[in-house]
Amino acid sequence: MFPTIKKEMKIFISSSRFDKKIVDLIVNAVVTDGHEVFHENLNIKLGDNWFKRINESIREYDAIIIILSRDTMNSKFALREIESIIMNDISRKSTRIIPVITDKMMPPSYLMNYQYVDMSRGLNYGIDKLRNILSEGTEISQRQDENILEDNKTRNEVFIQRLKSSLMAGDLTLVCGAGVSIGAKIPSWNALLLDLLETMIIRISNDKSVSLKPDDKNNYRSILGSSSLVMGKYLKSNLGKEFLPELRDALYRNNPQTCELINTIVEVSRPQRDGNPLNSIITFNFDALIEENLEKHNIKYKAIDNEGNRSTPEELPIYHVHGYLPRSGKIASTKNIVFSEDSYHTQFIEPFSWSNLIQLNKLNQNTCLFIGLSLTDPNLRRLLDVANRKDPNNNLNHFIIKKTPSLDSNNEKVDELMMFLEEQDANELGLNVIWVNEFDEVSTLVKKLIE
């Protein structure tokens, strides 16, 4: 049960300086009902602990009204205040928040579970609903799960329509991570590392029959450190000239072919009958599964893994920014694969490398849809941050599909705090989050781009 709100309440209003007109209307209405309202700046200074200061400032209030508008979402200061308020509310396990939507903006998903007031439908309607929520005997309650799910579905549809428009205009870039190929039996990053680790130990051991048991693999993982990039450095150094052939063997050992998500990417890559084609694909994967399946469907493409490669206007460019290892053929001695700590350091100290420039160009000029990525790649985060800072309007121009975090293995209860933190992180990097309940839903969502 949530607490019953008193007739006379202390109310805090969070807003941006552009919301003065709507704030004045709300203040006049709720003060008439006998409530006390505070809506001045909280005077949080540079370097202050936002969470602590917000907690100290708002704990005495019975209700918090958050004004949401396009101006609010474009104000980093206003967003930081809202995020700190939400985090305080989640940690308190109490609901005192009433979001007020003033225009047709799309609210963040972490606000969907609050009972909001939509004033874009009419000021009088909105004011009356807000006064009713604050009236004596009315609870500030969380919304019903089915309503939240319906709103998230509507939210995702709006995002899909924006992506479809970008595809039709020829401005859409797909950015693919490891999650794209795993369904086709490409080994996960950890499996790949341990496979190569076993190969390395066999090669340096006098006993060629040596193999790693599960406990041995865990021990070696802990010895080499928690960073997989450190392990990659050991593997690359010890395997020497055999590193790339062994990496390719491990990559294709299970004879991977395709999966539903790759098939969907191929469909989206087909030239559009009534629009422009997909602009490009950026992939962090070494494998050639997308290329192999494009070829099967007679779709022209060009795999690019260095600045010397160029695509023609008829070819879909596929940028392998971490390197490219086709299933067969000679591996050039100059082939570069971003696999280890030293490779990542190179990416950081060479801001004008072809791979960094390609990614920045697409982030600045196109709409990017991130699929199968966890946003842990340090260089990608840096490039996203750079591109986002260059946008004076703080627009969320790009999209990422993420699985809703759960508190239990059955995915029955959403981890609200983790969902909030993940969306906050994505938003600060210029990304809208399209939430799905299961990974299987990703291909269904991507397929809607061409339906």
Image (cartoon, rainbow, N blue to C red):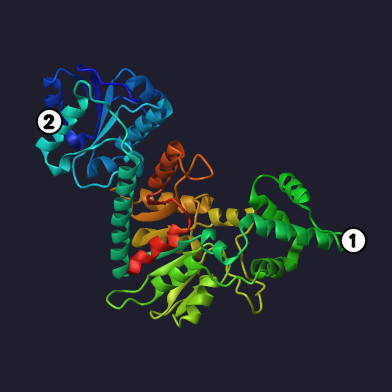
List x then y, in percent, for residue 134: 21, 25
> Does 439 sit left or right of 126 as displayed?
right
Q: Is residue 361 above or below residue 90?
A: below
Identify the mark at residue 66; answer none if there is no mark. none
Q: Amino acid at mark 1?
A: Asn
List x then y, in percent, for residue 221: 71, 48
Mark 2 residue crowding within 10 angstroms, few (<14) / some (14–19) / many (20+)? few
Secondary structure of the residue carrying tag 1 is: loop
Which residue has dot 1 on it? 206
Q: Is residue 399 above or below residue 86?
A: below
List x then y, in percent, for residue 7: 20, 17
Identify the mark at residue 25; answer none if there is no mark. 2
Quarter assignment of residue 196: bottom right
List x then y, in percent, for residue 416: 42, 38
Quarter assignment of residue 163: bottom left
Give how far apart the Cα atoms at labels 2 and 1 are: 82 Å
Mark 1 residue crowding within 10 angstroms, few (<14) / some (14–19) / many (20+)? few
Confirm whether residue 394 shows in the render.
Answer: no
The residue that appears at 84% across and 60% down in the rendered structure is: 204
Q: Is residue 341 above or below residue 307?
A: above
The residue that appears at 38% across and 79% down in the rendered structure is: 313
Q: Amino acid at mark 2?
A: Leu
Judging depth in this view, the residue of 220 and 407 nearest the camera is 407
Confirm whether residue 423 shows in the render.
Answer: yes
> Does 431 sit left or right of 38 as displayed?
right
